[in-house]
């Protein structure tokens, strides 16, 4: 629902032609998710820009033949079903690899194609919980806290895109496709950073610690007169600069706060000292001074503030959907705002207007016509 | 510190030969981060397995010549400095591209190479705050909450790996390298999922909502007799299965809970109904029943529980560092546990024992010897 479409959106942003094969009738479930703009799902739009759509019934002989001809010409098949689903339809890796030896087959699932949980259903929340990310997120003794964006799906989509592009590099050298098997749960374990090594080294099980860093201090959210900011003073020089900026030059000489290790041990005492000053003036006042002093700091932006941020705008990280010229009959969601492409490549443009997501089956005629012609040379 | 090393670790796991160029004397700062095992940083080990190390002073003429000869043969340069730093040393993209037209130059920074904040310092916490992820994480009216793993760095590392492998595909066709410019802040915006589209469509600014999903219900953490579990009943059929499993077949017929939209509107009332039953028995009891009923659910695992999970083990998602045969003199951190490689490729093995991270400058002799020989054909 999310990991596969996110993966193919990243690839589309990088120039891949992506043909979305959907169930006839209602298509991708996400087309039904609100809110809607001009009758089209904003959720669906934000994951399917720049793609084409064809509706195929994989139990119909004619439609199966169309998929087979698409696979003759495709570089990659990306599927996001539970393991076994496409095998039952005759389009699993074991079916396709002999017939299409150059095809790269990328399977993204909750738990992967192997192991005792392979056939279990999963959603983002389940892998965030089982993979350990939730055990590190939130406040000590507070209620369970999900990471507020679907990193279970999204990181799986990113690892799948890495696997696919790597497999393309391999195929350029060998002429052979391969199977890319990515599990959402595996992706969660892979992003635990040093939590595993830390636990293995010390035997201490890490828990949630709010906005703080486990081993760098001060590196936290702090209350100002009108709300919170974050400050990340990652070494002694930055701590000295921070202390000077808020008029507390004495802090680095306090034996409680001399080294990063001291500061981490006494993080509560240090936070109280810092907030006692910070809370007297508004966030903007401190952010201006901290920037001038070269201390990493920033506002905790809401989504509306992210969209207005000058750096976000300068980097084309907010884009607008618009009808694609000559690509099917796309009219959906024109003008809708969504996140841009964070992979900036010097050999390609980074347009602020992107082709909108296709209506269901919008590209059928064009694709069928193309399949009736001989394939282009040089694939 | 993290984004660049994470990116190159992902590439090393996929078969790339990664040579880490470090400052003579102390090397990568992360070598100093605790906890330590046999005198070596667990943090550094968990990010640098399978790499080689050479210490080069980029202000020394001899060492500069060594780097230049390395770049003659390298496919990719990955750098993680503030924009401008390598330019000042004569190794920026504008210097290198004319001399090494096939070289792919990947620059990972806090804010990217363009825009008003380009030269500002950033840490993970700062981009999590500025990019909006923190505004979606935590509990309503609760204190600010950081995502408990460094997703600011890690997603930037993943997007950089995608850019690098894509640039390799492009180079296979054109023979030309390119610049890959990835910003941690851009990556945070890119993983906001549908939050931007939702805000743009409705004008409502999304906030933190605990462990709940904004538009799917029930999809939350729930208290059992001995702790919390997560349940993700993403559609009407799954909700009916959940209700049956806990002996509350009446719930789906209650007008408050009939559709997903109804359930989302009355999520507090529904949670109270569900927890009234769930809290009477332990988590394991309910997880067994929910699995049998096909309802996505799971435990909220701590790190020690993640390491013991049979699926995590079956997928080789916990690996052990061991000395690499014939690769320098690696002995550091033998046996240390760390996360495995989540990109499973059928054409390559997925070993449970990985080469440990190198000691500083461990591979100098080998690399200098290699550079004295003519390059292999066929690069």
Image (tube, coloured by chain):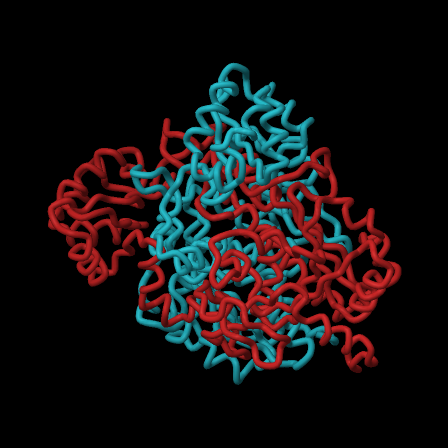
Chain colours: A red, B cyan
Note whether residue B345 is visible.
yes
Q: Quadrant of residue A316?
A: bottom left
Residue A336, percent from left and from top: 45, 66
In this rendering, is residue B107 above or below B329? below
**Toward the viewer: A368 or B327?**
A368
Measuring 67% from the left and 32% from the top, which residue is drawn there?
B294
Residue B246, percent from left and from top: 58, 21
Specify whether A212 is left or right of B175.
Answer: left
Residue B207, percent from left and from top: 36, 46
Measuring 78% from the left and 62% from the top, which residue is drawn there?
A177
Q: In which quarter of the image is the N terminus of chain B?
A: bottom left
Specify whether B294 is left or right of A310.
Answer: right
**Toward the viewer: B235 or B10?**
B235
Measuring 72% from the left and 73% from the top, which residue is drawn there?
B376
Query: Which residue is farthest bottom?
Result: B98
Residue A46, percent from left and from top: 51, 61
């Amino acid at each position: 629902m999310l990991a596969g479409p996110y993966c193919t959106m990243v690839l589309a942003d990088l120039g891949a032609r992506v043909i979305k094969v959907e169930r006839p009738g209602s298509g991708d479930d996400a087309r039904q998710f609100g809110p809607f703009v001009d009758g089209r799902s904003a959720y669906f739009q934000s994951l399917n820009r720049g793609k084409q759509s064809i509706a195929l019934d994989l139990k119909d002989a004619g439609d199966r033949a169309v998929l087979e001809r698409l696979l003759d010409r495709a570089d990659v098949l990306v599927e996001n079903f539970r393991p076994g689903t496409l095998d039952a339809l005759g389009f699993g890796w074991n079916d396709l690899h002999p017939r299409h030896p150059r095809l790269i087959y990328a399977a993204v699932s909750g738990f992967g194609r192997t192991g005792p949980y392979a056939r279990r259903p999963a959603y983002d929340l389940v892998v965030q919980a089982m993979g350990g990310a939730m055990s590190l997120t939130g406040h000590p003794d507070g209620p369970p806290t999900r990471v507020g964006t679907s990193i279970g799906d999204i990181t799986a989509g990113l690892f799948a895109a890495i696997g696919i592009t790597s497999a393309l590099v391999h195929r350029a050298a060998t002429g052979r496709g391969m199977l890319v098997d990515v599990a959402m749960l595996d992706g969660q374990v892979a992003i635990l950073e040093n939590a595993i090594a830390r636990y293995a080294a010390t035997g201490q099980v890490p828990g949630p610690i709010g906005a703080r860093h486990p081993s760098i201090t001060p590196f936290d959210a702090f209350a100002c007169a009108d709300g919170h900011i974050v400050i990340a003073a990652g070494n002694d020089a930055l701590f000295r600069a921070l202390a000077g900026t808020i008029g507390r030059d004495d802090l680095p000489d306090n034996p409680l706060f001399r080294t990063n290790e001291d500061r981490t041990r006494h993080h509560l005492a240090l936070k109280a000292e810092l907030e006692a000053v910070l809370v007297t003036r508004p966030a903007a006042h401190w952010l201006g001074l901290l920037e001038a002093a070269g201390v990493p700091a920033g506002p905790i932006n809401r989504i509306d503030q992210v969209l207005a941020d000058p750096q976000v705008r300068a980097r084309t990280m907010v884009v607008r959907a618009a009808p694609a010229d000559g690509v099917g009959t796309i009219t959906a969601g024109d003008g809708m705002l969504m996140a841009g492409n964070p992979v900036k490549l010097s050999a390609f443009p980074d347009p602020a207007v992107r082709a909108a997501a296709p209506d269901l089956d919008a590209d059928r005629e064009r694709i069928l016509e193309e399949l009736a012609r001989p394939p282009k040379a040089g694939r």
